[in-house]
Structures are given as structure tokens and as C-alpha cells.
Image: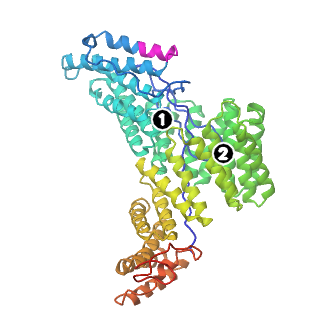
Amino acid sequence: MPTMPGLVSVKTPANAPPLRVSVPDTQQQPPRTPMKKTPSSTPSRSKPSPGRSAKKDSPGVSSSAAAVPDVDDPSLDNPDLGPFLLKLARDAIASGEGPNKALDYAIRATKSFERCCAAAAPPVPGGSDGGPVLDLAMSLHVLAAIYCSLGRFDEAVPPLERAIKVPDPARGPDHSLAAFSGHMQLGDTLSMLGQIDRSIACYEEGLKIQIQTLGETDPRVGETCRYLAEAYVQAMQFNKAEELCKKTLEIHRAHSEPASLEEAADRRLMAIICEAKGDYENALEHLVLASMAMIASGQESEVASIDVSIGNIYMSLCRFDEAVFSYQKALTVFKSSKGETHPTVASVFVRLAELYHRTGKLRESKSYCENALRIYNKPVPGTTVEEIAGGLTEISAIYESVDEPEEALKLLQKSMKLLEDKPGQQSAIAGLEARMGVMYYTLGRYEDARNAFESAVTKLRAAGEKSAFFGVVLNQMGLACVQLFKIDEAGELFEEARVILEQERGPCDQDTLGVYSNLAATYDAMGRIEDAIEILEQVLKLREEKLGTANPDFEDEKKRLAELLKEAGRSRNYKAKSLQNLIDPNARPPKKEASGKKWPGLGFKF
């Protein structure tokens, strides 16, 4: 039976704290976008966007809808009421009254501003006066932030979509900043909903507005470029991320001292991008330069985090002794500065466990896994569930590779449970479910595998996912369906995977070729011989003209094509040999009635 193609790992970020509810100051400049500081090779992007900070969950706050105010109240026409209600909303948050009370004030304030805008005189062409228009935009931003604080992200989207249409950047910098802030906040909210493509589109539009207002080389533009680059990394669009990160570096070099902290942050992100693209030498160079800048600034913990990243690069280059030295150096710093039970210590244990596994020292690897698990099982206050889930996921991969799939599955299930109630983690959960599906498949638990893949596919569809990873998951779900003799369903999944992988990877990619092969076998099993022949001819042509014939699959595909050509035009009473290459000989088909033609040994009606 052919082995199942490996899953592409989902690089999902550990979320920073959610948005804090605050009334935006339209004159405030966006703060620096922080880099993720956990010592991990997984690319990540901090969540707070320029111009906004993070919220805290209010304990005991109900997510039920606030009482709907009487929007027909004539007092809402008073132009002084909107600012007063907006202040009350802010005070309600600050005093601890809770987001529900603030939501009531914000809804009323927004309605008041809308009425004032409708009653105001039309703006003078080229005029810069914001008037009630900017007040309305700010009120919509606050309203959306309160919805987010209540975990009602879907309800935050319509106010933000309205907010980005209110200001007119042509009317001056105040309008431009309001439009920029609206696009960035909408991007953050969509990101929390897992709608990464829409989120990135909002960030791109925000950056465009900012550049038009401030120019190409303003330092604030550099910060937004880096923020968008981190979003591209999250979406695994590494070429776009690299282009923007280079621009950020140029801006910071022009406006900052040599080896500045801003430049160090840019280089750390560039190292992540280079590592993801397999350019390890350049990644190492960026990390060394970033480390030198951090050392000069006395940032000991940041130096240790960079040492972990340097260790990851050394491990990728098979320079294991240097990797151990980097990890141990970072471990010493983390233990002394953060404590021996801090999650950053556990994360270094995981890196060492992976290293010793790769070098065949399985006893040492298991020992470090157990040390990390002890920390994750009794987390210190302040440890986020994302940190724990990420660590457990990495440890599960080690257990899986040493042939302990049951233990690996337990860790993945625990990770998934930790994340299931966290907003913005649906894509991460889908990645975990896809990995579980692969393990179930290798264990011969095909029904469990199909269910895991189906759940992952549902989440990815809801997020609008169209990436190559989605295509790979569809292909693997199709293989699980084949083992369950659900051939029609498998065919549909392979067809959808084919379209996505052709678009994302091209016809010559190995994953795309694998789907072609699976689809041909499925068409053969369904009696669609001409379709199967057409696909196999296409595959053989690609291999002969572009990929070469040395691949061991070439002879197998050539033989399968010859058999199909031989069978073409004959009675359809034949063995579907292509499908037999996919089906596990130990899989038991469902019982069928005796009537009708069947494929010998497969239990299928033809």
C-alpha cells in the first residue's frame, strides 16, 4: 500500500493578548509592533495592530447582548450627546462596570453621531474639517473594540466595515489616520476569525493609505510594513514577507542608529523568513547581527531568545554541537532570569529533545521531553494556553517519530482542548486535527482519520482557506475515504484538491502529482476509464518532459496506463487494479447485497 503523503505543517502564531477596550485618540501615532519573543522556530506575528493596544478579558462578563437602546430617542439629535456617551463608555470600562454597560453607551453614541452626520452640511471639496464624520468613525472603532472584548468578533465586523467608509483620506491627515486605523482594526478582527486572506487585504489597504499620507520612508510606514510582513509569514507567503521586511530594514537604517533595536527586530523577522525558505546561511547572518544589537543594548533575555533561534538554524544545517551550545547558553539565561519552571525553559527542553532525537540519542531525547511536560502540566501563573499547546504539539511530533502514536495523539488532543475556546485559533485547531488524521490513518483507524480530516476541512472552509495545505488535507481525507470504500466521496475530494494544488503549487509539484495518481485510481474504480487514462497520460508526459523518469513512480504509472489502455473498449467486468494500489489489504469493505456486478475482493457494486 502506498504511504500517505506527509502533511505540510501549519505555521500558526501564538496569539498575543486580545484587544483592550479603549477610546482611540485620532492624533495618536501607531506604536511599535512587537516581535514574538518565545524561543521557537515557528514564524509568528503579534496580534495588536498599529494604533491599538490589547484588551484584557473582564472576569465574570456575560457575552449576552446589551439592552438595545431606544434609537428613536429625539435626544440623540443633540450634537453634545455623542461625545458625552463615548466618554461614559470609556469610563465604564475604566471603572470596572464592564463591557456590557459600555456597549450600551457606545451604541447610543454611534447612533447620535450618525444623526449629526446626516444633519451636517456637506463637506467643502478639499476641506480638512473632520466634524462629526471623524467622531462617528471613532465611535464605530470603540463599538467594535467592545464587541471584541465580549468575544463577539462577528458583530465587530459590520461597524468596522462601516467605519472604513466614513473618513475621506483626501480631506486631510486626520481622515487618513481614521481610515488607516479602521482598516488595521478590521484586519485584526478578521484575523481573530481566522479569515487570513481578508485580514491581509485590509492591512494592505491600510498601508497604502499610510504611504499616501506620510510617504514611503516614514518610520511609521516601516512599522506597518513589518506588521504586514508578519501577516504574510502567518499566511506562508514568504516572498511577499521578504520584500516588505527588506523595505522595513531600509527605512529603519535611514532613521535609526546603527544596530538599533528596531533593526534587530527586523532582522529576527527576516531570519524567520529565510529559514522558512530554506536559506539557512542568510538566516544565521541576520540572527547574529540581531544578537549583537541586543547585546549592545543589554537585552539579556532577548539575546537568549535569539540564541535559541540560532540553535534552530544550526540544527537545520546538521551542525549539532554548535546547536547544543546555543541551546544550553539560552537555557542558562532563562533559568536564572525567569525561573526553572518557566515555559521558555520548557521550550528549550523541547528543542534539545528534538536535537537528541535527530542524532539518535533517544534516552536523552525522552528525558528532555519529560522535563518539558512536567513544566507544561503545572504551568506557572502568566503562562498562556497557546504556549502550552504549542509545546505539547512539538513534543507529540517527537513521540510520533519514535513510534509512540498513542502518546502523541493524547498530547494533540490535550493541545486541541486548550485552544478550542480561544478566538482566532480555528486554523491552528484544524492543523492539529489534520495531524491526528494522519496518525489515525497510519494506525489503520480509517473512520477516525476521516472524521478528523472532515473536521479540519470544515474549519478551513469556514476560514476561506484556499492554500496548498488545504489541498493536501483534502487529498488525505480522500485517501481515508478510499479505505472506507467511499469512492464517490473520495473522487470529489481528490478533484477539489487537484484544483487547489494546481493553482497553488503547479502541475509539477509532488503533492499535485500525488493527487493526479489518486484521482486516476479513483476514476478507474468508478469505471471512468477514459478519464483515468487522460490523467495518467498527463502525469507521464510531465515526468518525461519536465521531471525525468528516474522517479520510482514512473514505471508504476506507466504500467497502470498500459493496463487501462488494454482494458479500454472491453466489457466493464474487470478488476480495478489502480484502486487496489491504494486500498489497505486489511481494510474490510462494508457488506453489500449479492446482486449486481462487483470487483472481486472489493465488495463494491459496479
In front: 378, or 62? 62
Residue at the spot 48% in from the left edge and 82% down from the top edge = 577
- Which label was assigned to residue 251? 1
Question: Magenta stretch containing residue 96, yes or no?
Answer: yes
Q: Where are the magenta residues, as a range?
A: 88-97
Q: Secondary structure beneath disc 2?
A: helix
Task: Point out residue 73 in the picture as x, y percentages from the top left corner.
Answer: 27, 14
Vertically, is 346 above or below 64? below
Q: Quadrant of the C terminus?
A: bottom left
Upstream in the sequence, badge 2 or badge 1? 1
Task: Point out residue 465 in the picture as x, y percentages from the top left corner.
Answer: 42, 51
Q: Would residue 602 be found to the left or right of residue 498 on screen?
A: right
Label 2 sits on residue: 391
Residue at the spot 43% in from the left edge and 83% down from the top edge = 561
Residues under labels 2 and 1: Cα distance?
A: 35 Å
Q: Amino acid at mark 2?
A: Gly
Q: In this rendering, does residue 134 appear at all?
A: no
Q: Quadrant of the N terminus?
A: bottom right
In front: 331, or 132? 132
Q: Secondary structure beneath disc 1?
A: helix
Task: Point out residue 49 in the picture as x, y percentages from the top left corner.
Answer: 47, 32
- Binning the other alpha carbons within 10 Å of mark 1 as few (below 14), some (14 to 19) or many (20 upward) gives many
Vertically, is 455 above or below 515? above
Vertically, is 533 above or below 246? below
Question: Magenta stretch containing residue 238, yes or no?
Answer: no
Task: Point out residue 563 in the picture as x, y percentages from the top left corner.
Answer: 44, 87
Task: Identify the main secondary structure in magenta.
Answer: helix
Badge nearest the viewer, 2 or 1: 2
